[in-house]
Amino acid sequence: MTETAGDSSMQEARHEPQVLANIPSTIAQRRTALIFVLSLIAIFAGTWPFKDVKLWEIEAFLPSVAAALSVADGVAAALLFAQFSILRQWALLIIASGYSFSALMVFAHALSFPGVFAPHGFLVVGAGLQSAIWIYWIWHGALILSVIGYALLKDSDHEMGVRSARLAISLSIVAVVAVAVGFYWFATVHEDLLPITFADVRPLSLFRHLVGGITLLVMGGIGLCLLWVRRRSLLDQWLMVALCAFLLEVAIVSTFAARYTVGWYAGRFYQVITATVVMVVLLAEMTKLYVLLARTNMVLQYERDNKLKTLEAMAASISHEVRQPLAAIATRGGTSLRILEHAPLDLGKVRSNLSTIVSESHRASQIFDNIRALFNNADSAQHAIDINEIALGALRVLRDDLEEHGIATRIELASELPPIMGHGGQMQEVVLNLIHNAIEAMDTVKDGYRILLVRTEHHGRDAIALAIKDSGPGIDPERLGSIFDPFVTTKPRGMGLGLAICRMTIERHGGQLLASSDKDKGAQFQFILPINSALGATGAPLSN
């Protein structure tokens, strides 16, 4: 079946990097934005009746605000350009260019404003009140046009591609700088060509002043409506908040508030909100994404370290497990060579040794399969297992070792034990490891009997147990809690992996491995395995 256009766009959205321009806002974020806008409206309503009240004349206020606005708009533009470089959407390039143009025009407005840096503007002869007001209109008009362009293009950007984000950003910055310089030059050098709106500090033409303010209000309203209808992302939400502050600023400035009045100061306050709200949200979200990235890297590093530890444990496990059959092969091979050097030749003994070598070779090969299945958490090759047969098979393999160390074996196997489902090779390795540990433990006992007890029994109605008890020196009670931890050993040359692998194997089979010890009476290891209720009545393998 073919994908619909909607499904395709949804898949594309899922594969896009998650940044401010495409992540949806949460209910809490929308609530915060609403509270913020209502607070701005409340401040506007509270200051409106006092807009003409004269306040202190702080001469440094306007250049300070201009510097703050220029920096805020510049930072917002840089962050939006960064969003564009990730998503390659023309809408983001337009809104970023709008903020960069705003940063330049704020600076131009402050330079041309009479009485801020010089009586008639700074650096350019001819600047005056008309220059400052027209730069203000151009500055605000260009910003709102960039918002409208963003709103119109943002939903169709998946059909457009930008091959070189760096080239597009460079060209847009060059164009913005050229246009800003051009407007500043014309508004200052050719101020006499501009329609007169202000004389001294009061509006000269009420009509022209109102037309300028109303035009900006209409444009801002259009941009707000477009964003409201097309809102999709967190960036859309906070651009709407910035537009609300923009509209409140234009509304209060259009009421002809004189300089250093409550209305004049309030207008600059809304300018700061318009410039900084998007910047603050961009910085906040970028910080969150950085924290998320740092945490993700930590998780990846942790997983990498775990994989390396798993590989290390696997290599050590192979070395630990294979050493036993290889030692048996070397011993039987050496014994056979010595037999061949003496006469008469004991063919029966040689044949027995060769049979042991073949058996241990097969066992060594099986160990690799067992460990691979263990570390891969594989559930394949599970069969119905007779735990009594597993115990007897392990004793047969280690019969010569038991005789060589003078260990007597007691076998107490419960009759009619139900089979369990599991990996036969892994279960035999567990029993072999436990018996081999018991042999090594009893080898330290110089006096007294050496007895190995192997016992199987029912454990309740739903489980069976196998216990291996030795007559060795036992285990220090303080070490009982840690003997199953990897790389913890009581042997001078031990690796500390045998019991850890045994416990892992038993737990993979749904059971538990327990250890106990009586002082000077040896140690006992017992594993308990659940009876698989899904096992067929015939005891045939359920998987192959």
Image (cartoon, rainbow, N blue to C red):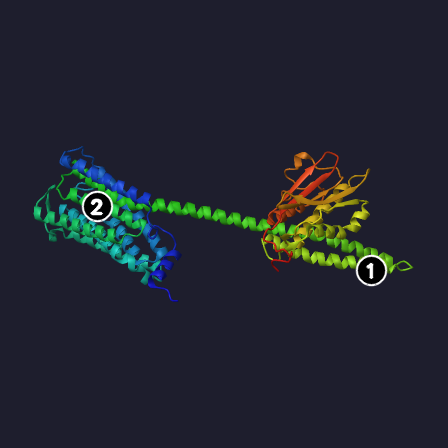
Quadrant including the C terminus: bottom right
Q: Residue at x 80, y 55 (%)?
A: 332
Quadrant including the N terminus: bottom left
The reply to whether residue 538 is in sight is yes
Q: Is residue 292 left or right of residue 388?
A: left
Q: Residue at x 29, y 48 (%)?
A: 74
Q: Nearer the viewer, residue 274 or 358?
A: 358
Q: Nearer the viewer, residue 346 or 200?
A: 346
The residue lying furthest to the bottom in this view is: 1
Q: Which element type, helix, strand or loop, lies under badge 2?
A: helix
Q: Tell me the number on the disc at residue 423.
A: none
Q: Which residue is mark 2?
A: 246
Q: Horizontal and vertical percent for residue 310?
A: 59, 50
Q: Nearer the viewer, residue 350 or 539?
A: 539
Mark 1, Cα crowd under 10 Å, few <14 / some 14-19 / many 20+, is few
Q: Nearer the viewer, residue 544 or 231?
A: 544
Q: Amino acid at mark 2?
A: Phe
The reply to whether residue 160 is in sight is no
The residue lying furthest to the right in this view is: 344
Q: Residue at x 31, y 46 (%)?
A: 279
Q: Horizontal and vertical percent for residue 455?
A: 72, 44
Q: Which element type, helix, strand or loop, lies under badge 1?
A: helix
Q: Horizontal and vertical percent for residue 358?
A: 76, 59
Mark toward the viewer: 2 or 1: 1
Q: Amino acid at mark 1?
A: Arg
User: Which numbered disc flags the more N-terminal residue, 2 or 1?
Assistant: 2
Q: Quadrant of residue 47?
A: top left
